[in-house]
Image: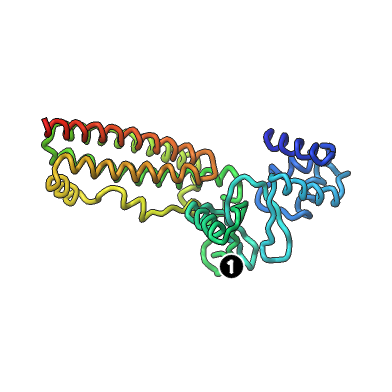
Amino acid sequence: MQDAVETFETYLRTKNLKHSKPRRDILDVFLGSQGHLSAQDLYDQVKQINPRVGFATVYRTLKLLEECGLARSMDYGDGTQRYEPDRFQHHHIICTSCNRTVEFLSPELEELLQNVQASHDYLPQAHAVRILSLCQDCTQAPSPSGRHSRAKDFEAILSRDALEVAMTNEEQGLQFYTHAVEVTADAIAKSVFRKLAEDEAQHLRALQQEYNALRRSHSWLDDEPSLLYFDYDRLQSIFPKGPAHIRDLVQRIGASEALKLAMDAERRSQAFFSYYATRVAYAKGRAIFAQFAQEEERHLQLIHDAYQAIKTQSSS
């Protein structure tokens, strides 16, 4: 909140405008708002705390907030311009019948939009995708609770989604290293695979504890659909899968090649987490992915050192 106030004050100074009490009241109500407000909606709310504020002041202030990057606007298909605090780079699915709005994030969509702009020689700027559809309520089907219209609940859903992605990756690594230990005869490779299996198990326990705590503190969370969409095919292809397949593969290719395979998997895993650490637009997700990118980099170095030791040993 304070950062937003300072941003607004700085922008007003550049326009030789004062940060008056009516403008501050409008800013406070807007930043604390839930959902997406028209100028009239915001005016009605501000009037409850400052009856002297005029509609023209609310409208002009909204435009100033949009200009300085604290608000963004969108026509949701009904001819009315609505505004929301610009907290996340996100997109919207809008019901054409009742105007119910769902916010979602998708790093793949972000990359696609950036690439499309670049391919047409446009400089990528701010953007928002608007998908017009019919909500389940309006098609007589059960509808989700829609709690993600509130910023704190939006964060909880995104945190759950990010944790699920991280756990999926750690489960794959744990399975691979556990079964690789069983069939690896070389002492160096066996020691490294055992260490990595222990690390993956520890990471998975920590992630599971955080995931369970999040779900306990938000009893409604299991009923909410995902809002953060990932390339799960890419994620699932990082490590070889299936106990029998892993054991057969590691036994067949030998210790040094198994370490090379593990290096490739850790490299792709590190690239996966690094990719999302720079594209997820909220702090919790960035922290999760950045942490695991660092962990995979450490694993990569450990495997590389073991691989070099085996190669040195075999050549001496």
Q: Which quadrant is home to the C terminus? A: top left
Q: Position of residue 113 (x, y in %)?
A: 54, 57
Between 34 and 223, which is closer to the camera in this rendering? 34
Near mark 1 (Cα within 10 A), the count class, few <14, some 14-19 or many ≥20, is: some
The answer to whether one can see residue 190 in this image is no
Q: Quadrant of residue 94?
A: bottom right
Residue at the far bottom in the pictured view:
139
Relative to residue 250, is residue 107 drawn left or right? right
Per the image, the residue denoted by label 1 is 138
- Colour scheme employed for the rendering of this structure: rainbow
Q: Name the kind of residue labelled 1 in the image.
A: Cys
Q: Which quadrant is home to the N terminus? A: top right
Secondary structure, mark 1, is helix
Q: Is residue 73 above or below residue 192?
A: below
Q: Position of residue 126 (x, y in %)?
A: 62, 52
Residue at the far right in the pictured view:
52
- Residue depicted at x 44% and y 45%: 275
Q: Position of residue 121 (x, y in %)?
A: 58, 58
Q: Is residue 184 above or below residue 148?
A: above
Q: Is residue 59 above or below residue 211?
A: below
Q: Quadrant of residue 185?
A: top left
Between 93 and 213, which is closer to the camera in this rendering? 93
The answer to whether one can see residue 228 in this image is yes
Between 304 and 177, which is closer to the camera in this rendering? 304
- Residue depicted at x 29% and y 45%: 265
Q: Position of residue 276 (x, y in %)?
A: 46, 45
